[in-house]
Image: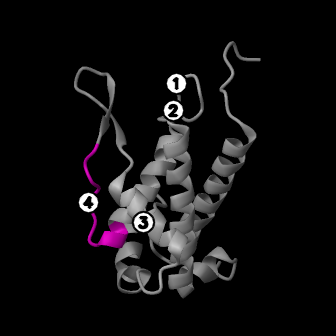
Amino acid sequence: MFAEEVKVDDYQKELVCKFFFLFSKFEYALKMARYHCGPGNAKANWDSFGASIDSQFYDNLPKEVSEGVEYINQNPPSKQVVKKNGELDWSRNSPQAETKVGVLLLYVCRVRNNLFHGGKYRGHFLLEPDRSEKLITSCMDILRHALTVSDEVREAYDGGAT
């Protein structure tokens, strides 16, 4: 047993696990659908995917997705950075992308990175639980909606591509 356990309630644990499973499967589907960065490291190209669905993404947007998009745009996740003096800090700079959907998807990646790389720990699992939970649920709604817009990524997500 570790000297200090991370405090996380069952709801947070379940929510984060669901997000990680959805995100990782989605990212795999992007690469299988050839939304990747080319030879070398197998890295998903979220910006390219965002550009490919930009014209359809906002058509008939379900209410929960619309609310999630609005929440993330009004309360964007910061990016954890290391300052010149070696201290950790947060950058509020917007990610660079070709389209609005590309920026939105890169914000989804930021939320994942902040969780996975430890940007949300300070004695409790989620530093700002209400904000973190809203960001995570918004990201999940956005990813699920993106699957409805792209047949090729949805097919790969559902296991049709190899």
State the residue position of label 3.
Answer: 69
- Specify the label residue 96 is tagged with: 4
Name which residue type carries label 2. Answer: Leu
Crowd band around label 1 with a 10 angstrom C-alpha radius: few (<14), some (14–19), many (20+): few
Which disc, if any, is residue 127?
A: 2
Residue at 37% across, 51% down? 75
Task: Report the magenta residues as a range.
Answer: 92-102
Q: Which callout, 1 or 3, points at the residue further toward the start of the chain?
A: 3
Give the CA distance from mark 2 to mark 3: 22 Å
Q: Main secondary structure of the magenta part?
A: loop
Q: Earlier in the sequence, mark 4 or mark 2?
A: 4
Question: From mark 3 to mark 4, how far is it between C-alphas?
Answer: 17 Å
Whether residue 44 is visible here, answered yes or no, is no
Residue type at mark 1 is Arg
> Which labelled disc corresponds to residue 122?
1
- Identify the element where label 3 is drawn: helix
Asked which quadrant contains residue 144, the reply is bottom right
Quarter of the image with the C terminus in it: bottom right
Query: In the image, which is nearer the foreground, mark 1 or mark 3?
Result: 3
Task: Answer whether residue 151 is visible to the viewer in this image.
Answer: yes
Q: Distance between the residues labelled 4 and 2?
A: 26 Å
CA separation, marks 1 and 4?
A: 29 Å
**Residue lying farthest to the top in this orientation:** 3
Q: Which of marks 1 and 4 is nearer the N terminus?
A: 4
Q: Judge the density around disc 4: few (<14), some (14-19), many (≥20) Cα neighbours within 10 Å.
A: few
Identify the residue shown where x is 56% and y is 82%: 148
Looking at the image, which residue is at 26% across and 60% down?
A: 96
96 in the magenta segment: yes
